[in-house]
Image (cartoon, rainbow, N blue to C red):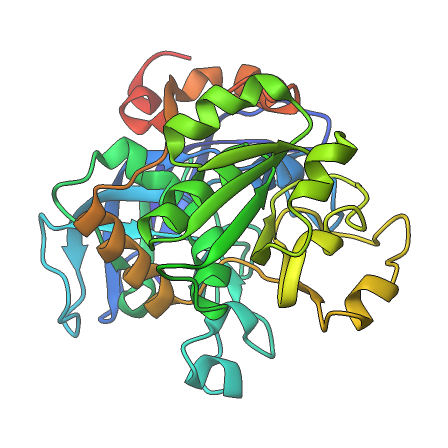
Amino acid sequence: MNTTLVKAYGTIAADAPLKPLNIQRRTATPKDVEIDIMYCGVCHSDLHTARNDWGGSIYPAVPGHEIVGRVSKVGSEVSKFKVGDLAAVGCLVDSCRVCASCQQDLEQYCIPGFTGTYNGKDKHLGTQTFGGYSQKVVVDEHFVLRVPKNLDLAAAAPLLCAGVTTWSPLKHWKVGRGSKVAVIGLGGLGHMAIKLAKGLGADVTLFSRSPEKEKDALELGANQVVISTNKIQMSEVKGQFDLIIDTVPYVHDVNVYIPTLNINGTLVLVGYLGPLDPMLNSVPMIMGRKSVAGSVIGGIAETQELLDFCGEHNIVSEIEVIKMQEINEAYERMLKSDVRYRFVVDMASLNEEA
């Protein structure tokens, strides 16, 4: 298969900084869409993959799975896109398409495993997939998304991961007008959960350990803020919530939140991957048929639904735009939660001197 050399930014080892690289992109097949990347959001998964925090990183690694750009080429069998269209790519670029999950438009739960936008296996080239910290991306039409023209394109990029990661549980647990939703943590995922739940008509509460987050949370659409370390405030919301979206990305005690669930309520983990510590106390769960669940990103249909919803309601992320050359500094700032609330790379900067 023919390939094209493309400028990118990536790392050659877990302990090496990201720097300019050249990568091979496949020439568009009949079913492919080639996209000139304009903006790429920066996700914690990018950092974890670059530094092999989860194990299994393939080097050289080029992260980035919150991609927005413009179509520069389409294959002969492509019907949904034409050259010049705005387009987006999220966390996955392929799946088996035939398993029970894929048949339900749940490609994120593909039973043999989906192909990640980066650190996956390119079925065409047999090499690893490379992400959006690059000039171009070539993706099968099925996994390319339409972007509403009214949205700020840079601020729309994080919808492809942070947005759909919180949208998916909101839709699965049927949040709508009159629902009571709580969000744990106000970061890249948490601020999107507040905006989307509010857009769906829910009454929204933020759980936070930081009183200084209250003003921001209310401005984003939260109805109230509860300080999770304040026992009086926590007792005042006992039995209230239909759904709690837990966006905290590190080990923490979820037991303190379960009593605030309503009967049949669910706490869904979307931020932390790994064993819960301390162990779950089953008493409040059994006594109220309460659940603790998990959820990850979204399928293609679900992501398109999110983008369309955000276009109708003019919902985007709160972002700080950076140059590609600032990515290593941005990673260090992310570790300190020093961003409100998502970095987005202006990919035009890739052509500037490093």
Q: In the picture shown, does residue 88 fall above or below 43?
A: below
Horizontal side of 79 relative to 130 (left or right) equals left
Residue at image coords 66%, 58% = 261
Residue at image coords 44%, 68% = 174
Horizontal side of 77 relative to 277 (left or right) equals left
Residue at image coords 28%, 42% = 68
State the image quarter where residue 211 is shown: top right
Q: In the picture shown, does residue 341 fall above or below 61?
A: above
Check the picture and name the quadrant holding the C terminus.
top left
- The image position of residue 283, as x and y in percent, is 87, 65
- The image position of residue 88, as x and y in percent, is 28, 50
Q: In the picture shown, does residue 287 fall above or below 158?
A: below
Residue at image coords 36%, 35% = 317
Q: Residue furthest top?
A: 353
Q: In the picture shown, does residue 166 fall above or below 136?
A: below
Horizontal side of 108 relative to 283 (left or right) equals left
* Depth order, front residue of 223/292: 223
* Depth order, front residue of 12/334: 334
Visible residue check, residue 162: no
Check the picture and name the quadrant holding the N terminus.
bottom left
Horizontal side of 77 relative to 98 (left or right) equals left
Visible residue check, residue 208: yes
The tally of labels here is 0
* Depth order, front residue of 172/210: 210
- The image position of residue 85, as x and y in percent, is 12, 50
